[in-house]
Image (tube, rainbow, N blue to C red):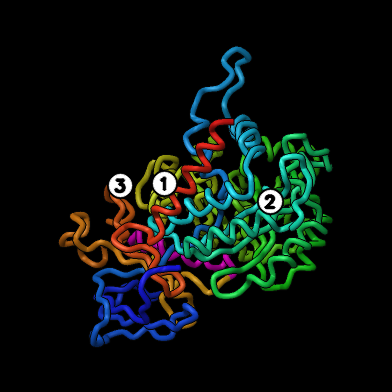
Amino acid sequence: MGGALSTCLFARHALLPQGWRRDVLLEWDAAGDLTAVTEGATVPPGAEVAEYVLPGMVNLHSHAFQRALGGMTEVAGDEVNQVADSFWTWRELMYRFARHITPEQMEAIAAQLFAECLRHGYTAVCEFHYLQRDAAGALYARPAETAERVLAAARVSGIGMTMLPVLYSHAGFGAQPLKPEQVRFRTGADDVLRIIEALAPQRGGQVEVGFAPHSLRAAGVVQIREVAQALPANRPIHIHIAEQQGEVRQSLDYSGRRPVQYLYDQVDVDARWCLVHATHVQPDEVALMAASGAVAGLCPTTEANLGDGLFPLAEFIAAGGRFGVGSDSHVSQSPVEELRWLEYGQRLQRQQRNVAATPEQRHVGDYLWQAALRGGAQAAGRKLGALAPGCRADVLVLDDAHVNLCGVAIADVLGSFIFCGNDKLVRDVLCGGQWQVRDGRHVAQDAIATAYKRALVQLRAL
């Protein structure tokens, strides 16, 4: 899958790990890995030339099936009983929707999502995959059936994938039994390990396989330890944590500790962990997260859509913490929008400007893009996130003809990309050495959209 074969790209300006550099030749091999990145190069005969080139972003948190739910939950709720809309009321709507999705529909939805993510600048995604069983709660004949469908969608779209089969055993702290609407998600430690084993042949190149305990509400610490210890040491582990105040209260009632503190007291958390959301954390928990090397997985558009709250980003940066961004429920498929609202949320909360910066990097756009690249690559467990030999050839070419980049100094390109207007400035996207987006269109956009529309018609008729 992908566009015409090519093995090099000449960039007038390229964002390397050390910053913007001029006249850079990128070369990659047939496996899709960068083999050489040469500064001060000249244009080879017949090479494609681009003005502004930067590494593709990693989407570190996705529930692909929720793309089809977008826009359907934006109606105020139960006025009669005076129940305020929240994450918890949204979750009930999501459960009802998830009940009906078939594996074929899941593949179509995921392919549409991934094509959109590529067009907006994501070149890899971490799929937090918990819709494992059929509508009656039975495992499919192939236990990894639905995960394999999502991986098939990744192949069709060309996006890189870290598949994270989810451990989901309980409805709440203290091993509360699952509700009927949660039976499609049910997995124990043995189920998860069986799915990971079934997916092992797909690892390599564009695919990694890790593990995700859904949350401390849905997975016990003994189960988490069992799977984590059985997983090879270099595989990523992701978990939802401290997303809502209700979860924090439940954790305190059950354990006497807040979720992050409870996790760190019970499990060895290190750099292969990604703590998704971690919205409601206190200073000692911020320090714990930063010191452990774990990545904070932040999803500002979803966290705003669900009314979760704001992560203490400035304090985490000051503590040396690592972070990345994800699109989660996919109310947006744009890394620009995630990064913009990550910064804007801090500005609103702190009533100041230009929060995400350090003494070494005062340009907010550059800091956000580079920091999220590093955190996202770490969370994905793959060689991503940099224009450097050995990394995947995941490259964005910006539209240098766009008015937002007209006459812009190179130091302000990322600031303009992220903070100036709502037009999509991504023109071409190379993923794993293959051109998947040209002139703003995915190479399989029409076929993918046709299958997605068919799935939507079926689901929305129920």
What residue sits 68% from the left and 51% below the top?
Answer: 260
* Real-space CA distance between mark 3 and mark 2, rounded to the nearest whole angstrom: 36 Å
Q: Decide: few, some or many residues near mark 2? Use Cα within 10 Å; few <14, some 14-19, many ≥20.
A: many
Asked whether residue 355 appears in the rendered view, the answer is no
Task: Look at mark 1 in the image and give the residue it sits on.
Answer: 341
Residue placed most toward the observer, 271 or 387: 387
Q: Is residue 367 magenta?
A: yes
Residue 100 at what x, y percent from top left?
A: 64, 38
In the rendered structure, which segment of residues is drawn in magenta?
Answer: 363-381
Disc 3 residue type (three-letter): Asn
Res 260 label: 2
What residue sits 32% from the left and 70% below the top?
Answer: 53
Task: Look at mark 3 in the image and give the residue it sits on.
Answer: 422
Residue placed most toward the observer, 133 or 346: 133
Q: Who comes first in sequence, dot 1 or dot 3?
A: 1
Asked whether residue 367 appears in the rendered view, the answer is yes
Q: Secondary structure at mark 3?
A: loop
Q: Secondary structure at mark 1?
A: helix
Position of residue 269 in the picture relative to residue 188 (left or right): left
Position of residue 32 in the picture relative to residue 266 (left or right): left
Q: Decide: few, some or many residues near mark 3? Use Cα within 10 Å; few <14, some 14-19, many ≥20.
A: few
Q: Look at the picture and state if 75 lies above or below 251.
A: above
The quarter of the picture where the C terminus appears is top right
Q: Who comes first in sequence, dot 3 or dot 2?
A: 2
